[in-house]
Image: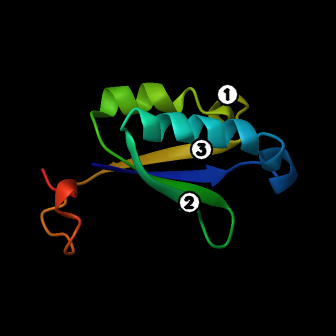
Amino acid sequence: MFVVSLSYKVPLEQVDAHIEGHISWLKAGYANGMFLASGRKVPRDGGVILAKGNRKDLEAELTNDPFHQHDLADYTITEFDPVMVADGLEALQG
């Protein structure tokens, strides 16, 4: 499992100009089963994506994000093994 942290490199006006494309890209990631959760950081200086799969595929998918294609954000990928989860989230293990 992976936590992808996006940090914006440009003013929000530039980010917002590409938000619709970013949301479409996120929806495709949910549809193909790679993305499990996503949202804005608070304060809004980036975002977070919870993803599954393998790192190589995730890295390739991130290059399709309009935020990446327009050099709007930096991406940090952290891999972790969820050995404990809350009730109802057992599917996240393994």
90 shown above or below 25: below
Q: Which mark is residue 39?
A: 2
Residue at 22% x, 56% y: name it.
92
Q: Residue furthest right?
A: 13
Q: Mark 3 points at which residue?
A: 74
Give the crowd class for mark 3: few <14, some 14-19, many >=20 residues within 10 Å: few
Using residue 52 as the reference point, say whether residue 14 is left or right of it: right
Q: Distance between the residues labelled 3 and 1?
A: 11 Å
User: What percent of the width, then of the height, locates residue 22?
Assistant: 66, 40
Taking depth in this image into account, of 38 and 80 the one nearest to the observer is 38
User: What percent of the width, then of the height, locates residue 87?
Assistant: 19, 74
Q: Distance between the residues labelled 3 and 2?
A: 16 Å
**What's the image's color scheme?**
rainbow
Q: Which amino acid does label 2 sit on?
A: Gly
Mark 2 or mark 3, which is nearer the start of the sequence?
2
58 shown above or below 46: above
Q: What element carries label 2?
A: strand
User: What percent of the width, then of the height, locates residue 11?
Assistant: 83, 53
Q: Mark 1 points at which residue?
A: 69
Using residue 59 as the reference point, say whether residue 6 is left or right of it: right
Q: How far apart are marks 1 and 2 (CA)?
A: 19 Å
Q: Which amino acid does label 1 sit on?
A: Gln
Q: Comparing marks 1 and 2, which lies closer to the viewer?
A: 2
Taking depth in this image into account, of 91 and 73 the one nearest to the observer is 91
Q: Which amino acid does label 3 sit on?
A: Asp
Residue at 27% x, 33% y: name it.
54
